[in-house]
């Protein structure tokens, strides 16, 4: 593969409504769109999904930009390569910074697939034509969560994830279950609890949650294994799983029954596909989580979710859930609880240049020469 140039667009767009967790309220989303261009003018697209502040992981938009500009782009341009998988291996020389790595690696995978004139989902072994769609509700009271959930169910979403934290958990879950007795519900705690809250978390067992996501520390595997033995609701790990080694450790300890695979969190396709393989071998369920993304990352999530094992609806909501206008020409649309896979070359979407330019705060291009 011959790379001619790499362009970074730092963008910012307001959300249609604030997204609330106990850690942060997000009312506008900054991110980085990565374009990798070859000598023939083909362009692969990636997206940096770090937030403006380090509330989800330690990475931010600014730190990702620095790592991309000063470390990863020079590494890509340091020597030739034949296949996109080589870039993920090359990035293993850099510690941490998974979201920056994923942004550039995703773009290279997309470019490689476009060069092969084939959909990216086919290159990674995907088979699913219909991608099951779930959505996230985040609000500061039960009434608002019920209202948001009702709107999403009416739009056809098959699974709803609600954000919980101490003092905003059991009663909210109880109220949602009362209104939606048959709906697939899962609770995302974003590490709001400790083992001392065991009895409190056990109280959620009676509400038939599909899972509780990341109840304990973001870097913990041991205490999650202890908690899983004490509750019947399956634990889903998110922030605790960054590398395939983390996944092997979680399997050994029995820390979870489900894993949320996010391309940005795990550093891109090379790591995500290995984590997926380990989960399949050990009968651990997987699904694809969301990061309040723009259309580029959302399209990559669709490609990943075509893999056979992604049987749980993911956080792949319509572009219109968050944005008045997305940055891609064909917005992602959920119909009757599913999204059709994108069969165009690469990730199957193109940038809406007018919209992208209107939300771009900074742009920089790096030549491979």
Image (cartoon, grey):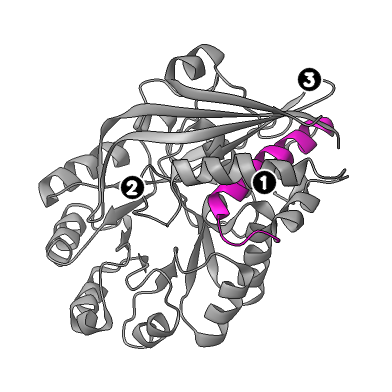
Q: Circle 1 sits on which residue?
A: 72
> Which numbered disc, 2 or 1, marks the residue that appears first in the sequence?
1
Q: What residue is at 62 percent from the left and 74 percent from the top?
A: 245
* Residue ID at (54%, 43%): 66
Q: Which mark is residue 41?
A: 3
Measuring from the top left, give residue 226's x and y in whole percent: 38, 88
Report how far apart the C-alphas of labels 3 and 2 lie in the structure.
37 Å
Locate residue 273, reporting x and y percent.
67, 59
Do the CB atoms of the residues marked 2 and 1 lie less than 8 Å apart? no
- Judged left or right of residue 331, residue 139 is left
Q: Which of labels 3 and 1 is toward the front?
A: 1
Displayed quadrant of residue 4: top right
Image: magenta residue range:
93-115
Residue 117 visible: no
> Mark 3 or mark 2: which comes first in sequence?
3
Image quarter in which the N terminus is found: top right
Q: Can you give x and y, in whole percent of width and height, for residue 82 in the image?
A: 88, 45
The residue nearer to you, when weighing 229 against 86, is 86
Residue density around tag 2, few if under 14, some if 14–19, many if 20 or more, within 10 Å: many
Q: Is residue 366 above or below residue 66?
A: above
Q: Where residue 92 sits in the image (x, y, percent)?
A: 70, 61
Task: Pick whichever, 154 or 333, lies toward us.
Answer: 333
Q: Which quadrant holds residue 351? A: top right
Q: Residue at x 77, y 37 (%)?
A: 113
Q: Which residue is mark 2?
A: 136
Is 100 inside the magenta-drawn segment? yes
Going from N to C along the chain, the mark reached first, 3 or 1, is 3
Q: Which mark is residue 100?
A: none
The quadrant in which the C terminus is found is: top right
Query: In front: 15, or 204?
Result: 15
């Amino acid at each position: 593969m011959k790379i001619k140039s790499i362009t970074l667009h730092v963008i910012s767009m307001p959300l249609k409504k604030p997204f609330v967790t106990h850690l942060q309220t997000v009312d506008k989303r900054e991110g980085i769109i990565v374009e990798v261009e070859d000598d023939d003018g083909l362009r692969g697209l990636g997206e940096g999904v770090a937030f403006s502040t380090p509330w989800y992981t330690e990475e931010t938009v600014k730190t990702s930009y620095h790592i991309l500009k000063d470390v990863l782009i020079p590494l890509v341009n340091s020597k030739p390569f034949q296949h996109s998988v080589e870039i993920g291996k090359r990035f293993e020389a850099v510690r941490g910074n998974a979201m920056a790595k994923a942004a550039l690696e995703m773009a290279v995978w997309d470019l490689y697939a476009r060069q092969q004139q084939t959909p990216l989902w086919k290159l990674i072994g995907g088979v699913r034509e219909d991608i099951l769609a779930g959505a996230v509700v985040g609000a500061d009271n039960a009434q608002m969560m019920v209202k948001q959930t009702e709107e999403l169910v009416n739009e056809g979403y098959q699974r709803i994830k609600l954000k919980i934290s101490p003092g905003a958990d059991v009663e909210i879950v109880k109220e949602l279950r009362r209104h939606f007795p048959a709906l697939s519900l899962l609770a995302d705690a974003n590490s709001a609890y400790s083992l001392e809250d065991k009895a409190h978390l056990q109280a959620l067992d009676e509400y038939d949650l599909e899972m509780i996501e990341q109840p304990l520390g973001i870097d913990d595997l041991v205490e999650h294994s202890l908690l899983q033995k004490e509750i019947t609701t399956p634990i889903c790990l998110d922030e605790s799983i960054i590398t395939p080694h983390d996944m092997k450790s979680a399997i050994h300890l029995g820390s979870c029954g489900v894993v949320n695979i996010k391309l940005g969190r795990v550093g891109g396709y090379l790591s995500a596909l290995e984590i997926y393989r380990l989960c399949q071998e050990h009968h651990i369920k997987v699904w694809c989580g969301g990061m309040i993304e723009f259309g580029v990352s959302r399209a990559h999530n669709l490609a990943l979710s075509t893999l056979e094992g992604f049987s749980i609806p993911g956080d792949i909501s319509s572009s219109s859930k968050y944005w008045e206008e997305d940055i891609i020409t064909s917005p992602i649309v959920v119909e009757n609880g599913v999204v059709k896979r994108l069969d165009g070359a690469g990730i199957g979407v193109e940038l809406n240049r007018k919209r992208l330019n209107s939300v771009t705060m900074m742009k920089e291009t790096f030549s491979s020469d």
